[in-house]
Amino acid sequence: MPIWNPYCGPAPTPAELAARWNPDPVLIGLLALAAAGWAAYRRRGGAGRDLPAAAAFTVLAVAFVSPLCALSSALFSARVAHHALLIVVAAPLFAFAAPRARPLPLAAVAAAHVVAVWLWHAPGPYTWALSNDAAYWLMQVSLLGSAAAFWAAVRTAGPLAAAGALLAVMMATGLLGALITFAAQPLYAPHLLSPAAWGLTPLSDQQLAGLIMWAPMALAYLAAALALVGRSLSAPDAGPARA
């Protein structure tokens, strides 16, 4: 059995978790620099919204600096929860904090995001990401970046087209969650041993991960789609979604 060396460090036990903050100075510096850059841009009169931006940076700090980072080395379910924070919390916050831009090709952006989600939750690429820091950050950046582009495209599309894209992505990620939930055996080698310290088997941890992807993430897409449909019904002649 290989010894995994994920970016977030070795898998912690429950007793160790509270102390397992990520002190990576490069990561903390980049987050601080990005937040300061946004603040400077806004002070110079740049368009955008400060509250969603602040919330998005806070979510990134929780995901990568808090003990959640270490927990995701132990549990695949924590890793999926971590990715859910990026995809359906941080990404839409960044998309709605940024100034409105030229409309993006909604179908192409949605497809690219679905491909990224499926790719990085396949056992091979996932194992690679937990074995190599460059692969780990490629996974995180591609998931967050493709999700932010998707939510930005949703923001600039017409309400019904945007709702349809949200439902399509919901079904695609939900199918992946179902496949993970109902797999007959553990699929993710880095999490074959570490769930035991948390009172889980590898298979039950994997099933919990699939349920997180299947239900809470689906609810986020569904809520956004229903809000857009409601807006369309209340203003049938409205153009692109305004937010």
Image: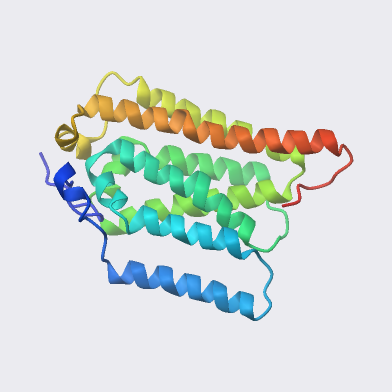
The reply, left or right, for residue 184 in relation to residue 152 is left
- x, y (%) of residue 199? 18, 30
- x, y (%) of residue 141? 43, 56
Residue 118 shows in the view: yes
Q: Which residue sits furthest right?
A: 237
Q: Tell me what residue is drawn at x 25 percent, y 34 percent.
A: 188
The reply, left or right, for residue 142 in relation to residue 237 is left
Q: Tell me what residue is drawn at x 21 percent, y 49 percent.
A: 17
Residue 146 shows in the view: no
Q: Tell me what residue is drawn at x 44 percent, y 74 percent.
A: 33
Query: Nearest the camera: 64 or 119?
Result: 64
Q: Tell me what residue is drawn at x 62 percent, y 79 percent.
A: 43
- x, y (%) of residue 182? 35, 19
Say which quarter of the image contains residue 120.
top left
Q: Is residue 12 above or below residue 207?
A: below
Q: Please, which colouring scheme is shown? A: rainbow
What is the count of numbered marks? 0
Quadrant in which the N terminus appears? top left
- x, y (%) of residue 204? 26, 25
Q: Is residue 73 above or below residue 180?
A: below
